[in-house]
Image (spheres, coloured by chain):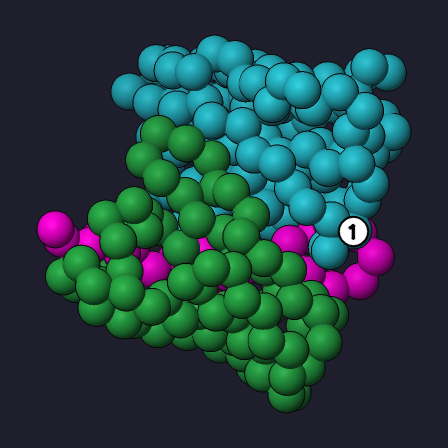
Chain colours: A cyan, B green
Amino acid sequence: KAGVTQTPRYLIKTRGQQVTLSCSPISGHRSVSWYQQTPGQGLQFLFEYFSETQRNKGNFPGRFSGRQFSNSRSEMNVSTLELGDSALYLCASSLETGPRETQYFGPGTRLLVL
Amino acid sequence: TQLLEQSPQFLSIQEGENLTVYCNSSSVFSSLQWYRQEPGEGPVLLVTVVTGGEVKKLKRLTFQFGDARKDSSLHITAAQTGDTGLYLCAAGSGGYQKVTFGTGTKLQVIP
């Protein structure tokens, strides 16, 4: 079974631009969560989508948004990029929603904002 | 908001040594997970513990969940170079997937 895939793997943008990241979960998984990882803040929860509905949201500004499609694929969008948005963005999928579910992480998209 | 403090932040040991990593919070968890992340990859789940006092063993790794479900530890016996990586604890509460990750412990095992 193929793992979680994320595209693109690397991205360079400039301040003020917007970016869209894509995540394809493991086949059959209905929950997709997004995380931001930085050396200073560690791994922080952005949001979770389950069956096309946002179930939970972390403490990030409204510039961060996402969506999930009927095939469970998910996209994350960041508008008006800031230097501090430079990070590794990780996507994780699980069969169902819930903190005890096993989450399978993709390799991440490394975003650099100049 | 749950805060998960891990200690130590960094650990560099010789192959064959034993080590323990701690994960602490002032909040009670419904469950706690341990992950390992290697450079360039996403975290990989090692174990999930749900019951206070629970001990789980995975080969040379022993995971313990505190009786009060506020803390956890990961003990590695006879560390190997393949154990090198970032170890993260993660806790959740409620019915949804809002998982909080710990601050991380970066382990380097030197041959």
Residue picked out by circle 1? A98
Which secondary structure, mark 1?
Answer: loop
Asked if residue A36 is positioned above or below residue A19 in the image, the reply reads below
Query: At x 48% / y 42%, what residue is drawn?
Result: B43
Q: Is residue B4 magenta?
A: no
Query: At x 56% / y 34%, what residue is drawn?
Result: A105
Instruction: Report the quarter where the N terminus of chain B lies.
Output: bottom right
The percent coordinates of residue B73 (x first, y second) are: 46, 74
The percent coordinates of residue B95 (x first, y second) are: 83, 57
The percent coordinates of residue A15 (x first, y second) are: 37, 20
Q: Is residue B109 left or right of residue B65?
A: left
Asked if residue A72 is positioned above or below residue A85 in the image, the reply reads above
Q: Is residue B83 left or right of residue A60?
A: left
Q: Amino acid at mark 1?
A: Gly
Residue A75 visible from this viewpoint: no
Query: At x 32% / y 35%, what residue is drawn?
Result: B39
Label 1 crowding class (10 Å Cα cut-off): few <14, some 14-19, many 20+?
Answer: some
Query: At x 68% / y 72%, what residue is drawn?
Result: B29
